[in-house]
């Protein structure tokens, strides 16, 4: 039996994470609807349970010790498991067949994932579906913590194939786009030099794509355009609609929106390495039928094949 079995509570885990995330006892107490003195006593109790200090208190705030960082990692996993269990049990209590929580990299949250979600919901009406949208880095953390069952995102070089399984859904180039009314939309002889005179909506600073793009432009002897780093579909649409910005997008997404008349794909861009879009899950957790069915629906949307409903009866 572990020293704290039966004594460590969910509230203790929430306290550890709040203090670690905020780095300030007063802010953590406010978030937890407690007082600073009560929180200090709770931390002392938790440290007594685990047998060592979790936090270092300094004039600048509160930071985790190595044991505190390990405690946070386990706390996130345990709380995520509790939340997942709560969702599953609530679904079963309503007479449903369970739940599926999907993480989606933000630039694919419109197409293809929204269409895949519609198809999945129709084929599996008794599965409670949740979709979390965010950056790849945050979603990988959620997948590790157990908050997600499956992730639809770029399979980056940082994704360890020894830890994660994946199914490639598409091999996608990055393209540059503009609004249909943009001057470049009808300028057939435009060059990269013309492109960089306009502001761009691009990948976040420090990202692999942003770094490769800047190196490639410098290699061409071109200046780096004014860039706003953003991974929001709504933000990008509004920026394009309101100004003269060019927008860096996955090629498959851009082609779908071009067919809808929402933007124009520009013909030129320095070559960038491709990162496959993939369905990703952890090797140490079994994949289930719902996870595989959702990945299949995303693949079918991308391929443009008719929706198959042959497994709908088994889910009902």
Image (spheres, grey):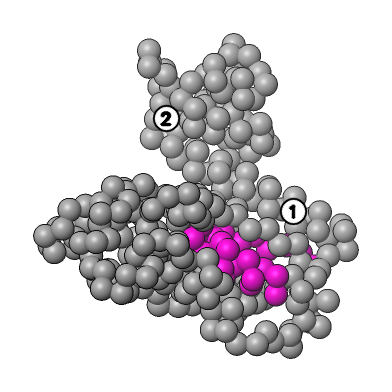
Q: Is residue 277 visible?
A: no
| Alpha carbon distance from label 2 to label 1 | 31 Å
Which mark is first along the chain, 1 or 2?
2
Instruction: Residue 83: give x, y in percent of width and height.
Output: 68, 48
Mark number, residue 64: 2
Q: Is residue 15 visible?
A: yes
Instruction: Indicate whether 9 appears above or below 284.
Output: above
Could you tell whether 163 is left or right of 196 in the image? Answer: right
User: Quick one: label 2, few (<14), some, or many (20+) residues within 10 Å?
Assistant: many
Q: State the extent of the magenta-drawn residues as a range.
A: 97-119
Instruction: Residue 47: give x, y in percent of width and height.
Output: 52, 25
Contact check, label 2 and label 1, Cβ < 8 Å: no
Could you tell whether 7 is left or right of 175 in the image? Answer: right
Helix, strand or loop at mark 2: strand
The quarter in which the C terminus is drawn is bottom right
Mark number, residue 101: none
């Amino acid at each position: 039996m572990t020293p704290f079995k039966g004594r460590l509570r969910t509230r203790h885990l929430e306290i550890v994470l709040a203090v670690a995330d905020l780095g300030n006892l007063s802010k953590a107490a406010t978030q937890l609807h407690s007082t600073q003195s009560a929180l200090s006593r709770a931390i002392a109790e938790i440290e007594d349970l685990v047998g060592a200090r979790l936090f270092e208190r300094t004039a600048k705030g509160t930071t985790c010790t190595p044991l505190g960082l390990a405690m946070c990692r386990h706390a996130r996993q345990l709380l995520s498991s509790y939340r997942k269990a709560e969702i599953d049990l609530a679904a079963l209590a309503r007479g449903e067949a369970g739940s599926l929580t999907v993480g989606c990299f933000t630039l694919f949250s419109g197409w293809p994932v929204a269409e895949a979600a519609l198809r999945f919901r129709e084929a599996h009406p008794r599965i409670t579906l949740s979709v979390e949208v965010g950056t790849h880095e945050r979603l990988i953390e959620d997948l590790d913590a157990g908050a997600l069952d499956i992730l639809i995102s770029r399979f980056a070089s940082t994704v360890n194939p020894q830890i994660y399984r994946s199914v490639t859904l598409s091999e996608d180039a990055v393209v540059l786009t503009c609004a249909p009314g943009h001057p470049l939309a009808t300028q057939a002889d435009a060059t990269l030099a013309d492109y960089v005179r306009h502001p761009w909506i691009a990948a976040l600073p420090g990202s692999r794509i942003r770094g490769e793009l800047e190196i490639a432009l410098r290699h061409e002897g071109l200046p780096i355009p004014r860039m706003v780093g953003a991974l929001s579909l709504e933000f990008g649409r509004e920026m394009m609609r309101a100004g003269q910005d060019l927008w860096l997008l996955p090629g498959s997404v851009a082609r779908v929106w071009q067919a809808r008349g929402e933007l124009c794909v520009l013909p030129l861009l320095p070559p960038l390495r491709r990162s496959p879009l993939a369905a990703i899950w952890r090797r140490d957790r079994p994949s289930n039928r719902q996870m595989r069915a959702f990945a299949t629906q995303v693949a079918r949307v991308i391929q443009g094949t008719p929706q198959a409903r042959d497994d709908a009866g088994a889910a009902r």
